[in-house]
Amino acid sequence: MVSNLGEELKNKGLVEGRVIAPGDSAFDDARSVFYGWIDRRPGAIVKVGNETDVSRVVTFARDRGLELAVRSGGHSVAGHSVSEGGIVIDLSDMKKIEFDVARGTAWAETGLTAGQYTAAAGAHGLATGFGDTASVGIGGVTLGGGVGFLVRKYGLTVDNLLAADVAAADGQILRTDAENHPDLFWAIRGGGGNFGVAIRFKFRLQKVSDIVGGILMLAATPEVVRGIIVEAESAPEELSVIANVMPAPPMPFIPQEQHGKLIIMAMMVYAGPAEAGERAVAPIRGLAKPIADMVKPMKYPQMFEGPEGPHPAAVAFHSMFIDTIDQRAAETIVGHIQASKASMAVAQLRVLGGAVARVPAEATAYAHRKRRIMVNIAALYERREEANAHNAWVDGFSNELRQGDPDVYVNFLGEEGEARVRAAYPGSTWDRLASVKRRYDPSNFFRLNQNIPPK
């Protein structure tokens, strides 16, 4: 069955795009995703070329009871971008983007990456906030919420989403916005891929051209870890900070004597004038003598340029929200990173608040509006037999750091069970999403995701 699926699609001539089957020379590249440990062999990969292709593949897979994966950029931590034995809708050839500069909006197909969209919008001195990695597809990052470099000033990606075209489980293409299918529009703003295939988005554009941004590296002591969070929270909302506590990698701009020593690699964007940006960054620079300082006036798209590093072979990972980093929490972070035996251990701290917190929790399916800090703990390693030790390290670290409810951002969630999926949708959000799921996908056809079964 699996071996004939691609040939069946080819012979039927259902799509204008390209069908890639097992045995084709392009198959192994087409099934590869960002995370190296995910090794699945779909029955067919369809590089769709338009919305009709998407609709027909959805109908084909549904009628045959096949698992369907949807790939925008291939960055799903849980591996949801590729199926084992089913069909993959690969959107990467759908990259059309249309700007209405006068109205400050853009229609963008979901095969675009964050870097491609940002470069195109930047040519007009405009931007929409996505994450912080150029190769991430705009489809997945948007449907999960979108937490990135502009989050404190302009909110989440979904706070700037005005409309979407979605292929539903029955194959229909639905235009959804505040007036059309408003329940679906609410659900796709944080509810992930549970409700259909997002084909194109209409975004609000912000005037973001010149920024102060880049990477600042400081020695990581508990006092500096705590200090950077305090300064980032008290800074103007134009400044968003992502602080990575980790051993210094052997990068050419890091002095050799610092390699392997504990550092904070802070990625910062001040979305405003250079003089004000330098003032906002100064208190963070003053926490310790910088090991490397590449924070400077630049164009916003430059934040998405440069190499992203090797794809990890294996990782132990946990994401969570906390509300403060006091001295004890800072000591916990430094102590656990120092104790790790992984090839790379990191605690990533994303300071939230600002525009994110001013949106009511019930306005979108992303309901973590009042949580102040997102923490991602990861141990990257090469040898599978070390998995238990690294998972135990992550569990101990996260348990000691935990504060408040065990909420999690859905885009940083692996295959961790139903309880963790529910933690991504606290309060009444879960029940509301389950009701929308029942209306638009009562058979749970779209299930290769952080799944919300129909109510």
Image (cartoon, rainbow, N blue to C red):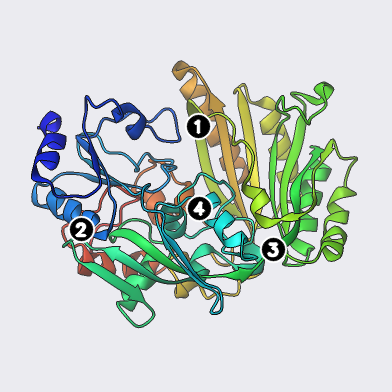
| Residue 150 percent coordinates (x, y) | 64, 61
| Residue 417 percent coordinates (x, y) | 35, 44
Secondary structure at numbered mark 1:
strand
Number of other residues with Cα within 10 Å of mark 1, as a class: few under 14, some 14 to 19, many 20 or more: many
At x 84%, y 65%, the residue is: 276
Q: Is residue 221 above or below residue 51?
A: above
| Mark 3 / mark 4, whichever is N-terminal | 3
Q: State left or right for residue 18 relative to residue 239.
A: left
Secondary structure at numbered mark 4:
loop
| Residue 24 percent coordinates (x, y) | 24, 27
At x 63%, y 26%, the residue is: 340
| Mark 4 / mark 1, whichever is N-terminal | 1
Looking at the rendered image, the disc whose residue lies closer to the viewer, 1 or 3, is: 3
Q: What is the distance, in whole Å, between disc 2 and disc 1 at their CAs? A: 37 Å
Q: Which mark is residue 406?
A: 4
Looking at the rendered image, the disc whose residue lies closer to the viewer, 4 or 2, is: 2
Please name the residue that numbered disc 3 is placed on.
Answer: 209
Which of the pair 221/11 is nearer the observer? 11
Q: Are marks 2 and 1 in contact (CB under 8 Å)?
A: no
| Mark 2 / mark 1, whichever is N-terminal | 2
Q: State left or right for residue 346 relative to residue 237.
A: left
Q: What is the distance, in whole Å, between disc 1 and disc 3 at their CAs? A: 37 Å
- Quadrant containing the C terminus in the rendered view: bottom left
| Mark 4 / mark 2, whichever is N-terminal | 2
What amino acid is labelled 3 in the image?
A: Ser
Please name the residue that numbered disc 1 is placed on.
Answer: 316
Q: Which mark is residue 55?
A: 2
Which of the pair 45/186 is nearer the observer? 45
At x 13%, y 50%, the residue is: 60
Q: What is the distance, in whole Å, between disc 2 and disc 3 at their CAs? A: 37 Å
Instruction: Please tell me in which quadrant of the rendered image residue 4 appears.
Output: top left
| Mark 2 / mark 3, whichever is N-terminal | 2
